Image (cartoon, rainbow, N blue to C red):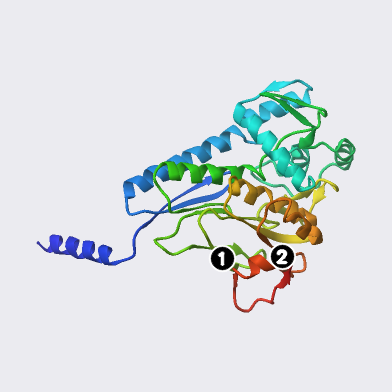
Amino acid sequence: MRVLILLLAAALLAACGKPPVHGREAFVFGTRVEVLVADADATRAAAAMSAVLQEFDRLHRTYHAWQPSELTALNAALAEGRPHAVTSELAAFIVDAQAIAAAGDHLFDPGIGRLIALWGFQSDEFRPRLPDAAALDAWRRAAPSIADLRVDGRMVTSAKREVALDFGGYLKGVALDRAAALLRAQGVGNALVNIGGNVIALGTKYGQPWRVGIQHPRAPGTLATLTLADGEAIGTSGDYQRFFELDGRRYCHLLDPRSAAPVTHTQALTVLVAPQPGAGMRSDAASKPLFVAGDGWRRLLAPLGVAGALRVAADGRVQVSRTLAARLKFEPGLPAPEIVD
């Protein structure tokens, strides 16, 4: 009887408490992934989250940049100057990535995989070592780009053998869009999906908007928080996520194709993307050219379809577009941001 009373009391407390938010975590795409579902039906939530994580794992394995995958098979063929037949999915990814790379003046370019490898970032562990200077000079002379690829149906050819694809700045965003579609197909309309700082929101958290934090690039905790409407996505690129230090200098994984070197003028850049087809992909891919652009980041907002952005410069100055500033809640004690149009 005492056990029964305790169980009934626990049930009453649960009924009086907040509705459940179900969550699952995993490590995919080289980062922590979190899926939150606001749904009273625990069985439906569990099935939907499992479907999402399974798709994440498939995308990660299929398009891995340095472990054997469909992407490495294509890169090997390109290096040998051979045409290569790819899946319809990969062909569509290439065409899609070509378009967004062009919109960002190719400051983000998935065709620079060899450069990423030269800097040691195609590895699970980074060694504090600079690339060979002659190899860098050769890469600069070749100047390979995803624009050098030609897609004819499922057949891919390249004008340059130096092109090697790395979808590290694109695939997480694609995964967000896949997650949103899978969740809705499973009957889940209220969820939040976070892939290492790339986030998409569905619906609400039982009537309250989902609130997310923007990581401070040099201090523990958040720089600011933001509520997301249904279908909105944010993405952050930062020099604090993948980097190595050598002789007191930080070398991050975000490379400028023009100089073939890591960016040093920016600590972090966050973009907000309005609800639209491919919002997740755009939140991932658009933050990279804006990060690389430095002080010229504002001119790329419209071409990339970005609703607003926040930049933390190398000296710690915070710049934020007026549209985004109106929605941000900055942490107390921080210097006032510069509001720009």
Tally the marks: 2
| Mark 2 crowdedness (10 Å alpha carbons): few <14, some 14-19, many ≥20 | many
Q: Specify the label residue 151 is tagged with.
A: none
Question: Is residue 24 toward the left or the right of residue 265 in the image?
Answer: left
Between 72 and 172, the one nearer to me in the picture: 172
Whether residue 114 is visible here, answered yes or no, is: yes
Percent x, y of residue 278: 60, 45
- Name the residue that disc number 2 marks: 312
Secondary structure found at label 1: strand
Whether residue 221 is visible here, answered yes or no, is: no
Percent x, y of residue 296: 81, 59
Percent x, y of residue 169: 67, 45
Question: Is residue 235 toward the left or the right of residue 45 in the image?
Answer: right
Q: Vertically, is 93 above or below 85?
A: below
Between 246 and 314, the one nearer to me in the picture: 314
- Name the residue that disc number 1 marks: 226
| Image marks 1 and 2: residues in contact by CB distance under 8 Å | no
Question: What residue is shown at x 55% (from left), y 46% (from top)?
Answer: 176
Q: In front of the other: label 1 or label 2?
A: 1
Q: Vertically, is 326 above or below 120?
A: below
Three-letter amino acid code at the position of disc 1 = Leu
